[in-house]
Image: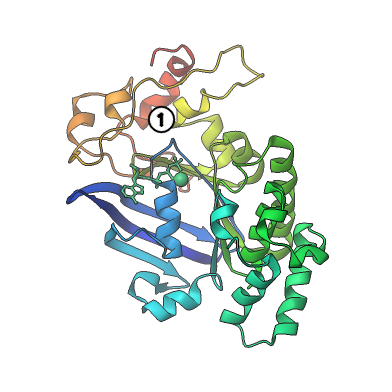
Amino acid sequence: KEILLEIKNLDAHYNVDGQPVSALQDVNFSIQKGERVGLVGESGCGKSTLLKAIMGVLAPNAQITRGAIKLHEGDLLQASPEQRRQSRWNDIAMITQSALNALNPVHKIGDQIIEAIQSHRDVDRQQARTRATELFELVGVPPQRLDDFPHQFSGGMRQRAVIAMALALSPEIVLADEPTTALDVIVQDQIFERLDLLQKEQAFSMILVTHDLALVVESCSRIIVMYAGMIVETGPTHEVVRRPFHPYTAGLRYAIPDPSTKYEPISIPGAPPDLSQQINGCRFAPRCPLATSKCELEMPPLVSSLASDAARQTRCHHADQMDQSRDRFHDQSF
Ligand code: ATP
Ligand code: MG
């Protein structure tokens, strides 16, 4: 399979009151052409920061201090601002949680899409409008509503319009940051179904950030679990969820109700570490029931956790104990 996007040794921090707050550390992964990957982890673990870094839209106080973001071999971090601008929306598109931020309230929605197309493609207004009409049909909004303003749209329709905008230039990869979180459950399902269909038809790659582990299980072949700015586990979704090797993944797994087991959902006590402090050991150690003094002193590397499957990787000194310890996570011995 062809690798489309490759993130290598990425470190990033935010400057807050002159102090660095580590938001991403040693992030490594790659995405194949057409692949759909789910990115999960609790609030503040760096999911949006990672997507913004890829998209090239980090906040001004953010700084990437190490690593590479390679799209087809070329490192986006070495590209000129103009190359970066060209690549945005064209190669990589982003759908964020709040459609309201993505749409300009004072312009008609159709005009915004047309303008986005014309800023990247040498087409006249009529051609761009034809494309916008086609896009509205794709996402399930009647094309006559191209002449509406954002406030005339319901939340669900606005989110569909944002998806239309993201797909306008047929990007190779779509970064979806909690694309349906702000909507009610029924509309969420409808929109997700549509996105699902479009992804299958157009075969773009997708990174889906969500708090809904069940949605990842349903729709993503691979999962990346982040904790406090680091990838702690990755692999084929079903395998990871069925047999987690990182205690944090086990905690996430048992935090959702599962009708097939007798266990009540549990949540992991404690909170993520303060990322403005230097942490040498495992960032999960203070909350981990398996932690030993080694965990407090030494950051574990992200390595293959299953000899039979190189795609399964875990960042834990005690991954080899998980097969014997997994039940403890059910038994609320956290
Ligand atoms: P959520 O699930 O709540 O969206 P997230 O995983 O997307 O969380 P990020 O938004 O990437 O997390 O934040 C990662 C860390 O960086 C957090 O500690 C957050 O407080 C911090 N952070 C994010 N944006 C900024 C900023 N502009 N300035 C300073 N710190 C920031
Ligand atoms: Mg976020």
Residue extending farthest to the front is 106
Residue 177: give x, y in percent of width and height.
Answer: 53, 50
Hey, what amino acid is under mark 1?
Tyr
Q: Is residue 294 visible?
A: yes
Quadrant of the snapshot with the N terminus: bottom right
**Colouring convention used in this rendered image of the protein:** rainbow
Question: Is 146 displayed left or right of 257 in the figure?
Answer: right
Q: In the drawing, does residue 264 fall left or right of residue 327? A: right
Q: Is residue 190 left or right of residue 63?
A: right
Which part of the image, by quadrant, shows the C terminus? Answer: top left
- The residue drawn where x is 17% and y is 51% is 18
Q: Quadrant of residue 102?
A: bottom right
Task: Determine whether the residue tagged by mark 1 lies in a helix, strand or loop.
Answer: helix
Residue 312 appears in the figure: no
Q: Which residue is mark 1?
A: 248
Number of disc labels: 1
Residue at image point 36% right, 58% down: 59
At 65% from the left and 45% from the top, the residue drawn is 219
Where in the image, quadrant-wise, is ligand 1 located?
A: top left
- Number of other residues with Cα within 10 Å of mark 1, as a class: few under 14, some 14 to 19, many 20 or more: many
Asked if residue 190 is positioned above or below residue 63 in the image, the reply reads: above
Taking depth in this image into account, of 200 and 323 the one nearest to the observer is: 200
Say if 185 sits above or below 4 in the image. Answer: above
